[in-house]
Amino acid sequence: MDKKITEMKETGDIKGLIDELKEGDIEERAESAMALGVLEAEEAVGALVDSLDDESDLVVSNAALALGHIGSDEVMGSLLDRLDHESWEVRHDAAIALGEIGTPDAEDELLELLDDEEMEVRQKAVEALGKVGDEETLEELKGHIGGEDIRKELVWSISLIGGDGAVEPLIELYEDGGGEIRKLAVRGMGKVGGEGVKEMILEATEDKNWRVREEAAKALNRVFEGEKIEAGSRYVEKLIELLDDEKIYVVKAALRTLGELGDEGVLPEVKERVEDDEPSIRSSAVEAVGRLGGKEAVELLLGRLERETNPRVLWSISDALSMVDEEGVEEMEERFDQVPEKKKIIVAVALGKNGSRAELSYLLEGMRDDRWKIRQKSAEGIRGIGPKDFNKRELNSVLSRSREGIEDNDKWVRMECIKALGEIIEEVNKDTSREREKLETLLESGDEDEKEAVEKVLEDIEVD
């Protein structure tokens, strides 16, 4: 991008960009239109609409895309007129813009583009129809399922529109499609839901393509919407079969869904994968155990904790322990002294994320550990404890550690401490002007993520 245009974009010089859009050469006009779209400059709408008549197809395309980013309904007529432009790139980008604006008024014109001579235009028209269409649009889209070059976009759009009318075309696309289309169709079935797709998803768990089997395991999770399914049901049994799949990704997907949908009756099958040789499967298995919950789950996880050496799996165990129910929390508190000293922080973090302040001292100590991951996770654990649950001495200690943390050399530690300070300032009736001052320094020195986090904190709090 031209240096001058780049500087205007970075400084938010909308007026300068509009002037370049009107008076610059072709490259400057095109780049200015693009920059105005990125900035979502509503005051530039008029100039961008005028640019839809530019002599350069590139400028027209960029102006159309910019108007789509800005999202003004006032430009609908101008964009619709560009759907029959002689340049296929302009038609392509006008269709994208209409989809981003998302108004149903564009449906008829977009449907006409399904017969466009250019494949790329047809594809974008289908995607846009997914954003603006309704169940009546589905009937039109169904008539184009035979088009091999737009099947991927059809699956996406039909899934997005959803409703009962989406089930039949998704099943048809699954049955007649290649591996990629079958995978997308199964994903769409999971989004659409309903009894009509459950049998097809169950069938897809035996697909010859492992990516389809993986997607089917995930889709069962979505289609049941968190509803617990009793051990022994056909769906649970099929997921248990997938635990022996040759592909790691399929096993991991099945474990996650079993954790979400299963009850304690599936714990024996999941338990076997907790001892798997592959660390990523152990991680998925322990997290599934955590979701299944209960006292037995805590005993199983603490037992694995004693033997585990892989850092990723250790933190997965911590995450799993943070999911257990009240009975599980009590079990952790009772067994904490039996945990190996070097691994106590793993359980302390889980207790904190469960709202227990029983092992706060370990978390405070962890915020000064030499390892950034320990510091970050300790801050996460402290954030799980409601600020009002701290006594005066504990609160002062947490504030002190959090102030130190926003100057940490690791970004993710700083991010957790920014959030911690914000939550404390918002909830505790205490003079926290010192903490606010610390946060405000990050508005100048922090990166974009940190500045965004600080701005949100300062918006949400009131400090006397």
Image (cartoon, rainbow, N blue to C red):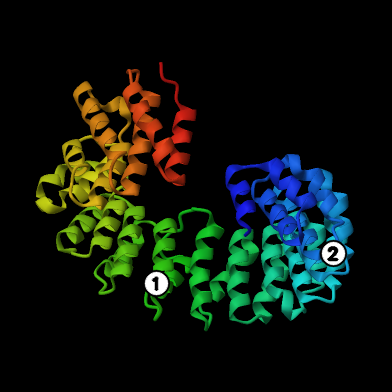
- Residue toward you, 110 or 267: 110
Residue type at tag 2: Leu
Q: Is mark 2 on a helix, strand or loop?
A: helix
Question: In this rendering, does residue 54 appear at all?
Answer: yes
Give the CA separation, mark 2 to mark 1: 41 Å
Quadrant of the rendered image containing residue 91: bottom right
Name the mark on residue 111: 2
Marks 2/1 in contact by CB < 8 Å: the verdict is no
Badge 2: residue crowd in 10 Å (few <14, some 14–19, many ≥20): some
Residue type at tag 1: Val
On the image, the x and y values in percent for residue 251 come to: 39, 72
Name the mark on residue 251: 1
* Direction from residue 174 to residue 347 in the image, left or right: left
> Quarter holding the C terminus?
top left
Foreground label between 2 and 1: 2
* Direction from residue 316 to residue 161 in the image, left or right: right
